[in-house]
Image (cartoon, helix red, strand yellow):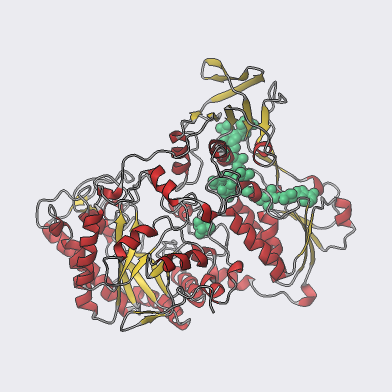
Amino acid sequence: MSSYPLLFQPLDLGFTQLKNRVLMGSMHTGLEEAENGFERAAAYYGARARGGVGLIVTGGIMPNPESGSLGMTHSLETPEMEANHRLITDAVHKERGKICMQILHEGRYAFNPKCVAPSPIAAPISPYTPEELTHEGVLGEIDNFIKAAAFAKRAGYDGVEVMGSEGYFINEFLAPRTNHRTDQWGGSLENRMRLPVSVVEGIRENVGEEFIIIYRLSMLDLVEDGSPFSEVLVVGKAIEKAGANIINTGIGWHEARIPTIATSVPRSAFTWVSAKFKAQASIPVITSNRINSPEEAERVLNRGDADMISMARPFLADPEFVNKAEEERADEINTCIGCNQACLDHLFEGKEASCLVNPWACRETEHIKTLAICDADKALNVAVVGAGPAGLSFATEAASRGHKVTLFDSADKIGGQFNIAKQIPGKEEFYETLRYFKRQLELTGVELNLGQRVSSEQLNQGGFDHVVLATGVVPRALNITGSDHPKVLSYLDVLRDKKPVGKKVAIIGAGGIGFDVAEYLLHDNKPEGNGEETPEQRSIDEFTASWGIDKELEHPGSLTGKGKPQHPADRELFLLQRKAGKVGADLGKTTGWIHRTELHRHGVKMMNGCEYLSINDGGLQLRNGEVESLLEVDTIVICAGQEPLQELTNDLSVPHTLIGGADIAAGLDAKRAIAQGAELAASL
Ligand code: FAD
Ligand code: NAP
Ligand code: SF4
């Protein structure tokens, strides 16, 4: 019997059947706007269909120019665009998959001076004040949704998803926060929901009965003056009646100041609200957010929280997710760790999406060319020194291509710095990447030698054709008077070696590691805080209480207004940087605000423009502008970046390549380390 009997039960929609309960949720990847973008998108979606997903939803497609951000694809009427979309639908159908086109009108979120909305109220995350639509304008927008759905049908899609959540156009009509109209489109709930209901009714009338309509309903707005859940239920009922086949769950507006998908959000943190909705619904309900394993998905279905599971980023991380689960190979799944570093952060930086743990995501056409197994006579005998992310990525990819790979690490386990990162509260998902690589090493036949600090002499005499040095980094020391004082610790002393830390602490360096050390020191008084929690153990109740999410669903927008840390710190922390400007400004675009908010909420004092003068028995002497002062602290933790560890290059006579931190330490992260390893292996 399958380990996931509910996940692999077909879902019957009457006129069509979905082969399992897995929906690949909508994600904008930037591919459609790229050169040869539709060919690449077809390969991308085709790979996910081949990987077994029951139903795919495309990234948002704009119904008209004013509905999307500048530079986004919107012209649906041309024969060329229909042919482009045909590439996608054909690729998915060839793999016996099904795909719906998401219709996304961004409303006031459109990064576009011509954006439109129910009322002229700018979003806090946008510089543009939208134009208030006239009555005729509203009718025109509804018509555009209907035309987009008709286009989707012509282009071969199996259905559409109407994006009605996340604070976009449709959602803006529903919530008093953004709808101040006094005509028939504003005021009473009946008026505010007239637009979404008209959109779904109009689409159904136009496309007929045998075409899937998914409606993404905002179940928790998580903003002030958002919809109360009592209204969400009424809207959901009306949408059902208007002709939707499936209701999908949307959580949180983009402007909400509550994390909804970051790695610090516990797994399945929001399925309870889908369950409350499902209890009243008569059509299938999909739940979503931070579900990233088949076990978790099965648990959610088993609780009866939903009829189907939406996962989006997990399909960037592993297109084969569903097949691996079905074939009882779940331990081979490359799990999405919720970091956002290569997917959402890329999009916010104007780059194409990819994935930290799977650098080939959205590069499928390129990867196909590199996948080929090399000819036996070209197979190399390669030594890899360092089993951190860079070395693991190279070793497994090179071995899967037929090269003979021997991997060395001086530590007694694989993972390098990931073994330290995974202990940070909210980063427990990093365990999964190590589990994945451990299994890949077994599957690809890499010879693993742990507990061996190799020397260049050993490498020279080992008969290797090539050596890959993935030896990582060493923490940068601080060069000031007193930096050898017993009060001074490196981040490795704290995180790896668990040296005692005082109650009043200065952290020097406010990069990713400085923030993580602060987070760790704030939480190491938690009862279960042994740094070894697995993702499943994290408490959803603690999370919702901490961020003021109203699980009783009584307040508008489902906010209690009473969020506060559940485990107040018993330490006073100072987080310092030399630069002027916001502390932590260089953290991830979509997650940095969460880290900054967390530390602020715990009372961490952040100081910029610091000049470190000396360390003595009293603490840290520093200058800030004209003012010199003594920061009276018990411990000073140095998180001042790293230097590459390249000692083996000195006497190495075998051809060699440096990757990861050993190559360049500045600006290093796991995204670069893993991508560099994979790309080098593909080039052999
Ligand atoms: P490393 O991970 O440092 O691995 C190098 C390996 O080489 C080590 O295992 C070492 O034992 C081995 N080695 C060295 N010399 C020898 C030798 N002579 N013989 C044998 N073995 C040797 N990155 C992110 O992208 N996102 C994050 O959220 C994130 N969080 C982090 C949090 C913390 C607390 C830390 C410390 C790091 C974090 N990072 C994060 C950074 C990320 O872990 C590194 O960028 C990544 O590990 C670098 O990979 P690497 O393979 O180059 O080096
Ligand atoms: P980092 O991000 O480069 O930060 C180093 C910090 O030290 C900076 O605040 C820098 O700012 C300061 N610094 C640099 N040289 C210094 C010196 N000589 N004296 C005093 N201060 C100095 O490096 P990191 O924090 O060590 O992180 C390493 C890598 O891991 C980063 O590239 C990061 O991307 C990755 N990481 C990512 C995350 C994540 O959440 N995405 C988390 C952890 C780590 P000033 O010069 O202004 O003082
Ligand atoms: Fe998941 Fe991170 Fe990959 Fe995005 S980059 S899909 S969050 S693992």
| Percent coordinates x, y for residue 223 in the rendering | 30, 47
Work out which quarter of the rendered image holds the N terminus and state it.
Answer: bottom right
| Percent coordinates x, y for residue 441 in the rendering | 70, 65
Nearest the camera: 568 or 313?
568
Nearest the camera: 229 or 617?
229
Q: Quadrant of residue 96?
A: bottom left
- Residue at x-position 62% and y-position 24%: 634
Q: In which quarter of the image is residue 271?
A: bottom left
Q: Is residue 506 above or below residue 459?
A: above
Q: Is residue 628 above or below residue 212?
A: above
| Percent coordinates x, y for residue 378 in the rendering | 77, 73
Q: How many labels does the image show?
A: 0
| Percent coordinates x, y for residue 133 in the rendering | 16, 55
In-image side of 636 versus 2 (left or right)? right
Q: Is residue 98 above or below residue 531?
A: below
Q: Which quadrant of the picture is home to ligand 2?
A: top right
Nearest the camera: 675 or 545?
545
Work out which quarter of the rendered image holds the C terminus and state it.
Answer: bottom right
Can residue 660 be seen from the camera position used here? no
Q: In this view, does 445 lie above or below 545?
A: below
Q: In which quarter of the image is residue 83?
A: bottom left
Tell which residue pokes out farthest to the front in this image: 527
- Residue at x-position 47% and y-position 31%: 581
Can residue 530 be seen from the camera position used here? yes
- Residue at x-position 74% and y-position 77%: 375
